[in-house]
Each structure stands twice: as C-alpha cells, then as structure tokens.
Amino acid sequence: MTLIYKLVSRADWDAANATGVFNGAEIDIADGFIHFSTAEQVEETASKYFAGRTDLLLVAADAAALGEALKWETSRGGALFPHLYAPLALESVARVDPLSIGSDGRHDFSRVLK
C-alpha cells in the first residue's frame, strides 16, 4: 500500500466525520483539488504552510484506493505531488494521527510516518 498524506485541521476533520467525506480545506476548494504530499514531502509542507499550528492531524490515505481521481502533478521544486480531483471518501483513509509540536518548534513526525 502506498500512503499519501494530508494535513487537516481537527475542525475540518470533525466536519468530514459528520458527513462521511472530506471535501477539502479552504485552499483545496479554491484550487479545485485536494492537496496531498508523500512521506518525503509532508514535513516540508507542514513547515511551509502550517508552521506553529497545534490543531493538525495527519491523514494517511491509500493512493490506490483513490483511483483515477488521483493525479501526480508537478509542483514545488519540480517534484510530483498527489492531487485528488474528488472528495476524499473516509473509507480510503488508512489512519489519522495527531501532530504535536517538538521542542524545536516544528511538527514532530517521528511517530506518525511509518
């Protein structure tokens, strides 16, 4: 299983759990797709766009389960990033982990990226 990752606020994830589907955060809706990162990309994504946020969850989804709606597109630094052009069905989610802030002020991924 290839996991891809989405950083989500606890409030947005609570709303998704209430409806059974995650339609994306505000930026995703504006861009027309849900932004995901690979395990190698997610820490930089967190530091670049979510620095200091204490309400974040790391949502891991099975890339294969997302089907043809998942596109790998060139983004930051020419790297391929996974973008989902559909709502995220919660049954495609492998796990959800809270992210803590380490003593260095950065999000601590040591226990959640497996």
Image (spheres, helix red, strand yellow):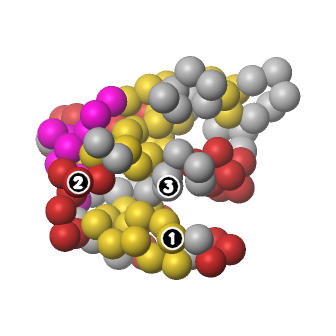
**Residue at 44% from the left image edge and 46% from the top image edge:** 5
- Name the mark nearer the viewer: 2 or 3: 2
Instruction: Name the element at disc 1.
Output: strand
- Residue 59 position in % (x across, y down): 39, 39
Q: Earlier in the sequence, mark 3 or mark 1?
A: 3
Residue 35 vertical placement versus 30 (above, below):
above
Which residue lies under the disc numbered 3? 37
What kind of residue is marked 3? Answer: Ser
Q: In whole angstroms, how far apart are the C-alphas of marks 2 and 3?
A: 14 Å
Q: Which residues are magenta?
A: 87-95
Residue 39 vertical placement versus 17 (above, below):
below
Residue 33 left/right relative to 65: right
Q: Quadrant of the N terminus?
A: top left
Tell me if I can see residue 33 in this picture. no
Which residue lies under the disc numbered 2? 64
What kind of residue is marked 1? Answer: Leu
Q: Looking at the image, do the residues carrying marks 1 and 2 touch, with CB atoms under 8 Å apart? A: no
Q: In whole angstroms, how far apart are the C-alphas of marks 1 and 2?
A: 16 Å
Frontmost residue, 10 versus 42: 42
- Residue 107 position in % (x across, y down): 68, 33
- Name the mark nearer the viewer: 3 or 1: 1
**Residue at 15% from the left image edge and 39% from the top image edge:** 91
- Residue 15 position in % (x across, y down): 28, 40
Callout 2 crowding tier (Cα within 10 Å): few <14, some 14–19, many ≥20? few
Tell me if I can see residue 41 in this picture. yes
Which residue lies under the disc numbered 1? 80
- Residue 6 position in % (x across, y down): 44, 48
Q: In whole angstroms, how far apart are the C-alphas of marks 3 and 1?
A: 9 Å
Instruction: Name the element at disc 3.
Output: loop
